[in-house]
Amino acid sequence: MNFDDFEKISQIDVDKLIDHIRNLPELLVSGWSYSKLQEPIHIDNISRVVLAGFSKIENSIAIFKLLINKHCSVPVITINENHFPIWCKNPDTLVIFLIDQNNFGEILNFLGSSYANNCSIITLTNNQSIEKQLMNYSVNNWIFDNHTFSRLTVAFDVMVLCGLFHKLNLIPDMSNEFQSTIAGLRKTMSKIDFNVTSALNPAKRLAGQMVGRWIKIVGGDCMVPIARRWSDQINESSKTMSYAEGIHQLINHSINGSFFPDNIVQQSMVIFLKSNLNDESIENLVDLAKKELMCNGIGTDVYTTLGETFFSQVWNTILFGDYLAYYLAIAYECDPSKTLTII
């Protein structure tokens, strides 16, 4: 596939997924801005936060937790809404529900149990009719008109949650992160965007190396959720078999599965995500693993994160991965927007 045949690419990308990818900087700002405009929420003495209803954006939640881990003063727990924990009670437990038309029925029982157990409750909804049905519970509700939390809106979704936690005084203000991060994202985009030719575009080149290969994305420490984001995007955009794992999983377990079936192993490729914000020992493990796989005939490559701060590195790496998955979809001439829906 010629990555620079723009007319052909436009025929493949019918729904213009590329525009959603390009919109990541704006979504970052708009998600944070939405939160800043909401009314103050006063909940005292929160001891833990429970997230329910977020199963379809599980990776976005992992990225959110990654961003707040070093700042949040209480544990944040994601639970299966089908199982109500007995410890989920009292006002010091805050339960945040993401509710839409698809999960409303199964969430309702959990919401009722949380309310009966005197938990503090905040709901995030995208439908006025749902909001009306929640009025009996007298809970704080943020409504997003016709917005669907999804892989395409990860920046907005994550920053809404960051903004909500800031409103609750659980994390500090992130406003000072935006100027340098947005500038960095613009710079990254200028090097990997659709109109940059393959000869000068590292995302297109890496996608070209992945064609016809079984793919694994490996992250060290803070890059593990980002590795999963890359893999999920490769699965969904390019319909390609891809997996993700952390460096410890690779070193201690899966590296032993690098020999058979030999015809598949020789057609595999492992991409390592590195960050200078990781501990030196973690990065050394990444280097050792890469060397070992290369010696066994497995294709490898490294993506080193860009950005001066942790916040900027996270979003720059997500942006690069989204472009990469898009270009791999173009290489296979499959519509990157369409995904298989089972339920």
Image (tube, grey):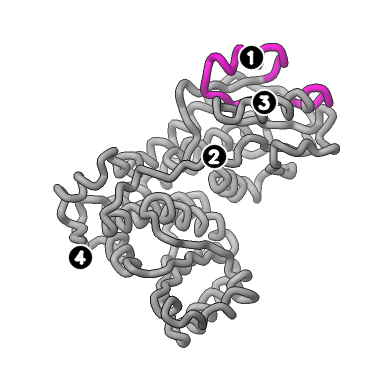
Q: Are marks 3 and 4 in contact (CB under 8 Å)?
A: no
In the rendered image, which quarter is residue 61 located in? top right
Q: In front: mark 1 or mark 4? A: 1
- Residue at point 72%, 42% (across, down): 73
Q: Which residues are magenta?
A: 115-139
Residue 133: image tag: 1
Q: Nearer the viewer, mark 1 or mark 3?
A: 1
In the picture as drawn, the residue positioned furthest to the front comes out as 342
Is residue 128 part of the magenta span, yes or no? yes
Quote the CA–CA distance across marks 3 and 2. 21 Å
The amino acid at mark 3 is Ile
342 left or right of 94 in image: left
Query: In front here: 78 or 92?
Result: 78
Q: Inspect this view and state whether residue 191 appears.
A: no
Work out whether 2 lies above or below 34.
Answer: below
User: How far is the residue under mark 2 from the one under mark 4?
Assistant: 37 Å
Residue to which mark 3 is pinned: 122
Crowd class of label 4 (few under 14; some 14 to 19; many from 20; radius 10 Å): few
**Tag 4: amino acid:** Ala
Q: Is residue 61 found left or right of 95 in the rendered image?
A: left
Q: Amino acid at mark 1?
A: Gln
Return the disc, 3 or 2, that comes first in the chain's sequence: 3
Q: Earlier in the sequence, mark 2 or mark 4?
A: 2
